Image (cartoon, rainbow, N blue to C red):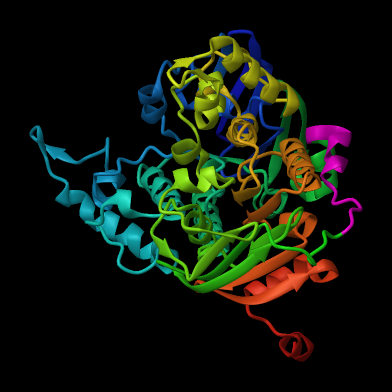
């Protein structure tokens, strides 16, 4: 049986040893899960296979023959392709241009893209049930939402006819129907003999799709298991040990809703939203539920002034406010942790220190002009220590961090602003169980200090873990509210699917 085997992989980034003799073996026709906490080395190992990272040491064999991969072109030559959570699509190009980018058909030195349009049209037809209306070959990619872009990234790689395919958090931005279609296409690929490496922090996806799984921690192999012979608890134990228990909801009293809300919104209208009203009380976590793409993200950005929106009234602690832009929202005590940390939450080429400082830079400027370098470093260091962000040095680019640590940098920069209301847009997307536990602890610490939180999450289990109340959205409207003991996974799924108690009884 053909296989892709990589062994003895070492890779160091400055003072951080990302991989220490790591290994992975993927057989043709199998889906092989690659699991581990953020910072464990999963993405580095995948990028070594894809030629995007040159290891300090490694042995790579394809079908038993030694293979040298010095860059992405070597990997493409051997039909090893990768889909990452960070997209490589070109925003100003069309869908068709992106799907054939780098593989354009040519004849006598002249590009003949029409030769590939049949394949492009067939792929878009295959994806059409979950792409949404109005998306065709000539649609500009920059106008599309993150989930649609992620599907196109997958489609682009499939059109290259890979022998081995790496899916590194490729489902993190997708809603349920999109995930189901992607899984169906992966199964079609494996039936044709394609070997797939699958990385996801959603354990139900790993259990559903994978044949085997390799777990790494701190750059070291922990185990390789047959997925059919294990369960979620065992996989989590192998990944993070006892730390997983920290992600439990635990006992905490429901916040009082007798006093004045810290945030009150009435009649909010925006693209994708219709007449939304809500209150958030001090120390309360209000979740946004429903199928993804029903206006949850638009609600958060609309409140924050980051996207066009109109409201009959918005009040912060009883005072009327009008947020024409994020600056006015920040001044009123709001913070927004966006859904796409790579493009909206971080300056990837800037240092960790600069990213942490960016929101509150003016507070550490002398006479409003000269930055106090010592105060700047002390502020960043305090957040790194408080949030236990694993870094090499403050001067390192934030792009060197794992997903979980990068997300904590996004949170850290807002904590320095001492917000009264925090808007969280899927804050643990693409984050491992251990980092989730730490982010949960940060959220609970904020509410213990009286901060109000609005939490959008694509994970119903997460909403059940954290939220005091959940507002269920459907087509931009709040259609149901769940509170207290009614906030359960089953109730959230039923509410999202508009299933009533009578429907449940009849079934």
Question: What stretch of residues is rendered in magenta?
Answer: 239-253
Residue 221: x and y, percent?
74, 24
| Residue 11 visible in this rendered orientation of the protein | no
Residue 146: x and y, percent?
44, 50
Above or below for 279 versus 26: below
Near-viewer residue (488 or 80): 488
| Residue 212 visible in this rendered orientation of the protein | yes
At a point 26% along the width and 38% down the height, the residue shown is 103
Q: Would you say residue 218 sits in the magenta stretch? A: no
Q: Would you say residue 248 sits in the magenta stretch? A: yes
Figure quadrant of residue 386: top right
Figure quadrant of residue 316: bottom right
Figure quadrant of residue 90: top left
At a point 32% along the width and 53% down the height, the residue shown is 143
Near-viewer residue (506 or 267): 267
How many numbered discs? 0
Near-viewer residue (164 or 338): 338
Residue 403: x and y, percent?
60, 33
Q: Residue furthest right?
A: 251
Q: Main secondary structure of the magenta part?
A: helix
In the displayed structure, does residue 452 sit left or right of residue 98? right
Above or below for 96 versus 360: below
Above or below for 289 versus 422: below
| Quadrant of the drawing holding the C terminus | bottom right
| Quadrant of the drawing holding the N terminus | top right
Residue 230: x and y, percent?
82, 46
In the displayed structure, does residue 95 sit left or right of residue 222? left
């Amino acid at each position: 049986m053909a296989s892709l085997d990589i062994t003895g992989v070492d890779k160091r980034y400055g003072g951080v040893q990302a991989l220490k003799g790591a290994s992975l073996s993927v057989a043709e026709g199998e889906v092989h899960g690659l699991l581990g906490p953020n910072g464990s080395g999963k993405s580095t190992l995948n990028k070594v296979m894809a030629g995007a990272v040159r290891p300090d040491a490694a042995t790579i064999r394809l079908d038993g023959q030694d293979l040298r991969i010095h860059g992405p072109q070597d990997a493409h030559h051997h039909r090893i392709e990768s889909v990452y959570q960070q997209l490589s699509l070109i925003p100003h190009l069309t869908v068709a241009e992106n799907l054939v980018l780098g593989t354009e058909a040519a004849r006598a030195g002249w590009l003949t893209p029409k030769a590939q349009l049949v394949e492009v049209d067939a792929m878009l037809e295959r994806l059409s049930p979950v792409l949404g209306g109005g998306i065709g070959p000539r649609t500009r990619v920059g106008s599309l939402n993150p989930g649609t872009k992620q599907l196109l990234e997958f489609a682009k790689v499939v059109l290259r006819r890979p022998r081995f395919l790496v899916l590194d958090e490729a489902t993190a931005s997708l809603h349920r129907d999109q995930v189901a279609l992607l899984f169906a296409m992966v199964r079609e690929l494996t039936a044709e003999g394609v070997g797939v490496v699958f990385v996801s922090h959603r354990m139900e996806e790993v259990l559903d799709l994978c044949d085997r799984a390799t777990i790494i921690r701190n750059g070291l192999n922990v185990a390789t298991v047959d997925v059919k012979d294990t369960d979620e608890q065992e996989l989590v134990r192998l990944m993070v040990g006892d730390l997983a228990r920290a992600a439990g909801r635990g006992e905490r009293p429901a916040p009082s809703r007798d006093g004045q809300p810290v945030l009150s919104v009435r009649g909010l209208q925006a693209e994708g939203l219709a007449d939304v009203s809500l209150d958030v009380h001090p120390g309360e976590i209000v979740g946004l539920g429903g199928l993804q793409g029903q206006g949850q993200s638009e609600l958060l950005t609309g409140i924050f002034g980051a996207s066009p929106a109109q409201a009959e009234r918005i009040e912060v602690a009883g005072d009327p406010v009008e947020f024409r832009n994020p600056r006015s929202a920040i001044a009123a005590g709001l913070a927004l942790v966006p859904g796409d940390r790579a493009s909206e939450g971080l300056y990837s080429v800037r240092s960790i220190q600069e990213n942490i400082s960016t929101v509150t830079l003016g507070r550490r400027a002398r006479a409003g002009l000269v930055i106090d370098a010592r105060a700047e470093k002390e502020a960043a260091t305090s957040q790194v220590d408080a949030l236990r962000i694993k870094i090499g040095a403050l001067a390192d680019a934030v792009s060197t961090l794992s997903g979980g640590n990068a997300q904590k940098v996004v949170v850290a920069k807002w904590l320095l602003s001492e917000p009264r209301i925090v808007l969280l847009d899927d804050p643990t997307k693409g984050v491992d169980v251990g980092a989730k536990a730490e982010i949960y602890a940060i959220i609970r610490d904020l509410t213990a200090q009286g901060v109000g939180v609005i939490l959008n999450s694509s994970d119903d289990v997460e909403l059940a873990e954290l939220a005091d109340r959940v507002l269920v959205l459907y087509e931009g409207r709040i259609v149901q509210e769940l509170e207290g003991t009614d906030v359960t996974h089953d109730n959230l799924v039923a509410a999202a699917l508009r299933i009533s108690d009578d429907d449940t009884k009849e079934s």
